[in-house]
Amino acid sequence: GATKRGDFFSLTEEDFQDGFALKFHGAVRMTRAAWPYLKAAGGAMVNIIGVGARNPSPDFTIGGSVNAACANFAKAMAQIGTRDGVRVNAVHPGLVRTDRLMVWVRQAMEKDGLDEASVLARMAADSETTRIGEVEDIAALVAFLASPEASFIHGSIVDIDGGRARGM
C-alpha cells in the first residue's frame, strides 16, 4: 500500500489515520510479533522506511510524517535491542523501480508522450539522483544488514537513494 499524496488542505483526518495505520502501526505490530523470536535467536531486524522521512515535501505530508515516525520507532527499538540482543537497523530507499513507481511512470508516459526510459531519466534528474534504484539494490543492503558481517552496525538508518537525501 501507499500513503495518500496531495495538497495538505485537501487531505482528510481519515487519510492521515489510514497512512499511520498502514505503515507505522503495521511496523509496531510486526515488531511485537517477531521480537520474542528475534530475542531468542539473537536476530536482526531491518526496517524499510523511506527517504521521505528526511526530505519533507508539501505533497507528501502523510508519507513523510509516517516515515519520520517509523525512523524514530526503529531508533527506539535499537535501544531496546541493545538490552535484548537484537540488532535493529533501517533503510531509507529513494526512487526504486517498484509496481507503485511504474504506475507513475505509465501515467507520465501517457500524459507527456514519452517512452519509459525517458520518463525514468527525467524522474532521476528531477530528484537529482544518480539513477532510479532497483529492488535488488535495496535487497542487497537489507541482506547485508541482517547478516553476521554487519554485526557492529546497530541503530543505524542508511539512505539508499542515489544521493537524493541532502541532510546530514
Image (tube, helix red, strand yellow):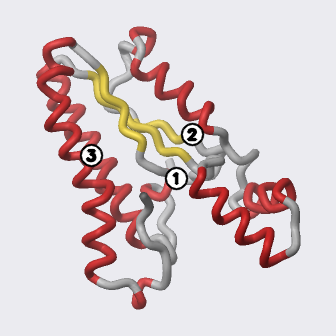
Q: Which residue is mark 2?
A: 160
Per the image, label 3 sits on a secondary structure element best described as helix
* Dot 2 or dot 1, earlier in sequence: 2
Between 27 and 71, the one lying in front of the other is 27
Per the image, label 1 sits on a secondary structure element best described as loop
Between 3 and 87, the one lying in front of the other is 3
The amino acid type, in three-letter code, at marker 1 is Gly
Question: Position of 13 compared to 128: left or right?
Answer: left
Question: Position of 83 compared to 6: left or right?
Answer: left
Per the image, label 2 sits on a secondary structure element best described as strand
Q: Which residue is mark 1?
A: 167
Q: Residue 57: x, y in percent?
A: 51, 71
* Residue at image location 42% in from the left, 89% down from the top: 10
Q: Nearer the viewer, mark 3 or mark 1?
A: 3
* Residue at image location 62% in from the left, 32% down from the top: 137
Q: Residue 168: x, y in percent?
A: 50, 47
The amino acid type, in three-letter code, at marker 3 is Ala
* Residue at image location 13% in from the left, 21% down from the top: 84
* Dot 3 or dot 1, earlier in sequence: 3
Question: Position of 131 compared to 66: left or right?
Answer: right
